[in-house]
Image (tube, rainbow, N blue to C red):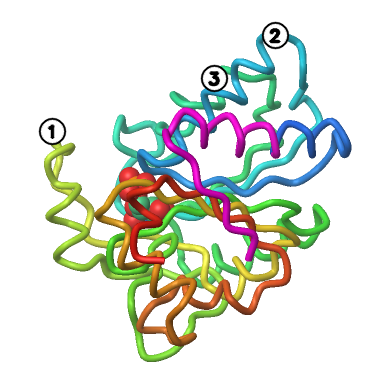
Amino acid sequence: MDVRIFKTEEEIGAAAGKMFCDFVNSKPDCVLGFATGATPVPTYSYMADQCDKGNVTFKDVKTFNLDEYCDLPKEHKNSFYMFMYDNLFSKVDLKPENIDFLDGNTDPEAESARYAASIEAKGGIDIQLLGIGRNGHIAFNEPADEFSGEAYKIKLTDSTIEANSIYFDDIAMPRYAMTMGIGSIMKAKKIIFIATGASKAQAVHDMIKGEVTPKCPASILQNHADVTVFLDEAAASML
Ligand code: GLP
């Protein structure tokens, strides 16, 4: 793993965002995998700014996202699709037909097969952006007894529900989500991983220095050939 440590989230956003933009300029029809949460926002801001300045175009880029809630309309303000629309899709020249998202409101097995086939048909994900949960989860792959494979429907943990319920003021917080599995994530050709803040320090330590175990899903990244890790000093404090 190529571990790079920065002082601020903005510096990370610019460094990770530049890596994405440079790749898009080298392969304009590439396939990018995105994540939601607070961590990737500075990176999306940098990418949107570069597109606005005419330094990169996403017109031929195809995208996939890691996860989406079940039993929540795609257009609901708290859906992961709307998070991406607000933070990136509405700010760059991506074509709507090139944006693929897991559908949390259909048959999970059929949707898993559809998503895997769509990723394969587009040549696989060139760069997958990842964050991490405090317990070492990636996407919604929580600590488990074995590593998951392709996308599947998961019951959200009480801690995840508790952490996100504050955002749901008009509808009950979903109890389930569709998530890309560890197997589908590991097929990405390259991974850009970002973590900031002291709350992620233990998970980052376990990911990089711990045993490879599904008890810390992110530890599987030790087995990936091309992972660039962007950390601030707080998230790197236990390395
Ligand atoms: C959720 C998402 C993950 C994300 C994690 C951390 O669990 N499913 O994809 O990495 O939260 O979010 P944040 O970046 O806000 O800490």
Q: Which residue is mark 1?
A: 170
Q: Which residues are magenta?
A: 1-19
Residue name at image x 48 percent, y 33 percent: 84
Amino acid type, callout 1: Asp
Tell me the tag on residue 53: 2
Q: Mark 1 or mark 2, which is nearer to you? A: 2
What is the C-alpha distance between the residues marked 3 and 2? Answer: 15 Å
In this view, which residue lies farthest toward the right? 26
Considering the image in quadrants, where does the N terminus appear? bottom right
Q: Which residue is mark 3?
A: 90
Q: Is mark 3 within 8 Å of ligand 1?
A: no
116 or 1, which lies in front? 1
Q: Mark 3 or mark 2, which is nearer to you? A: 2
Instruction: Using the rendered image of the protein, determine whether residue 39 is visible from the camera's viewpoint.
Output: yes
N-terminal of the pair, mark 3 or mark 1, is 3
Residue name at image x 64 percent, y 38 percent: 99
Residue name at image x 60 percent, y 76 percent: 183
Q: What percent of the width, then of the height, locates residue 105? A: 40, 53
Q: Helix, strand, or loop for circle 3? A: helix
Asked if the magenta segment contains residue 207, the reply would be no
Q: Is residue 100 above or below residue 2?
A: above
Residue name at image x 57 percent, y 50 percent: 4
N-terminal of the pair, mark 3 or mark 2, is 2
**Residue 25 as seen in the image, left or right of residue 126:** right
Check disc 1: other Cα within 10 Å, few if <14, some if 14-19, many if 20+: few
Q: What percent of the width, then of the height, locates residue 55? A: 77, 16
Check disc 2: other Cα within 10 Å, few if <14, some if 14-19, many if 20+: few
Amino acid type, callout 3: Ser
